[in-house]
Image: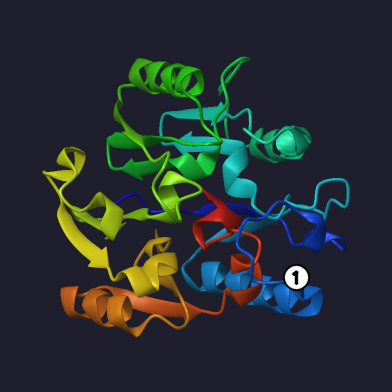
Amino acid sequence: MHMFTHSIVCPPCANFAGGLTTAGLGAPILERALEQHERYCEALERCGIELTRLAPDPRHPDSTFVEDMAVLAARCAVITRPGAMSRRGETKAVREALEPFCGTFYEIEAPGTVDGGDVCEAGEHFFIGISGRTNEEGARQLAGFLSSSGYTSTFIDVRGLAGLLHLKSGLASLGDGWLVAAEPFAGHGGFIDYHMAFVDPAEMYAANCVRVNDRVLLPAGYPGIEKRLREIGFDVLILDMSEFRKMDGGLSCLSLRF
């Protein structure tokens, strides 16, 4: 499992509630979102991560979800072209924050679109989701960049799968050959070489968990998958994500880890 040393984060801005969402869970409470984000940052630091904190960006209400702006691997960095037009201005600040750490960048070009939330790294292999935000052309460009850096990839079509805005809304790689997956992925041939920990449909949101070095960050309120991960042997750290869930965001969405 690759050990992360750095992460880029961005706190929610004052108009966070004006961002994109399909959740139908009501408006987020900004004060609570800021507190939850700070607890998230503290958790990353407890995992040995040095943080680069971007300034809140009121021009872009979704800018706290920095993961969508880049795909980072040990041997390459790709700046995305988000599927939502309103988010395309977010890439500039993320790229500038990455420049001290990444010497060469690839970039997704029109008409391709890619959201980082559709890209799941599993060691030397990447699963690339085709979704409402990542189109076939963007996925092909990304696969080509990854291939030129020595990685393999597989396309996973999540269009039409209920509850999955992005691939990682229902899939997480925890290293050591383990994937956490939502029930829609049961029996999918692309995952035949992995150990699978399936999430009960009632706990689907918790499929977006994230391995950070020796810990697995998991949203609060999902005892079934928490118990399963502890039984497997993972060290689980629970975080309240209620306000980010209201905006279609999960644990992985809030940071770029490298």
Asked which quadrant contains residue 29, the reply is: bottom right
Q: Residue at x 73, y 32 (%)?
A: 85
Q: Where residue 229 sits: x, y (%)? A: 25, 74
Query: Is 101 rendered above or below residue 197?
Result: above
Count of numbered circles on the image: 1
Query: Is 122 rendered above or below residue 138?
Result: below
Q: Is residue 96 visible?
A: no
Q: Residue furthest left?
A: 193
Query: Is 221 rendered above or below residue 24?
Result: below
Q: Residue at x 30, y 75 (%)?
A: 225
Asked which quadrant contains residue 28, the reply is: bottom right
Asked which quadrant contains residue 110, the reply is: top right
Question: Circle 1 sits on which residue?
Answer: 27
Q: Secondary structure at mark 1?
A: loop
Figure coloring:
rainbow
| Amino acid on which disc 1 is placed | Ala
In the shown orientation, is residue 152 left or right of residue 137? left
Which of the pair 184/70 is nearer the observer?
184
Q: Where residue 60 sits: x, y (%)? A: 81, 46
In the shown orientation, is residue 256 left or right of residue 179? right
Q: Residue at x 43, y 19 (%)?
A: 145
Q: Residue at x 20, y 56 (%)?
A: 176
Q: Where residue 84 sits: x, y (%)? A: 68, 36
In the shown orientation, is residue 85 left or right of residue 140? right
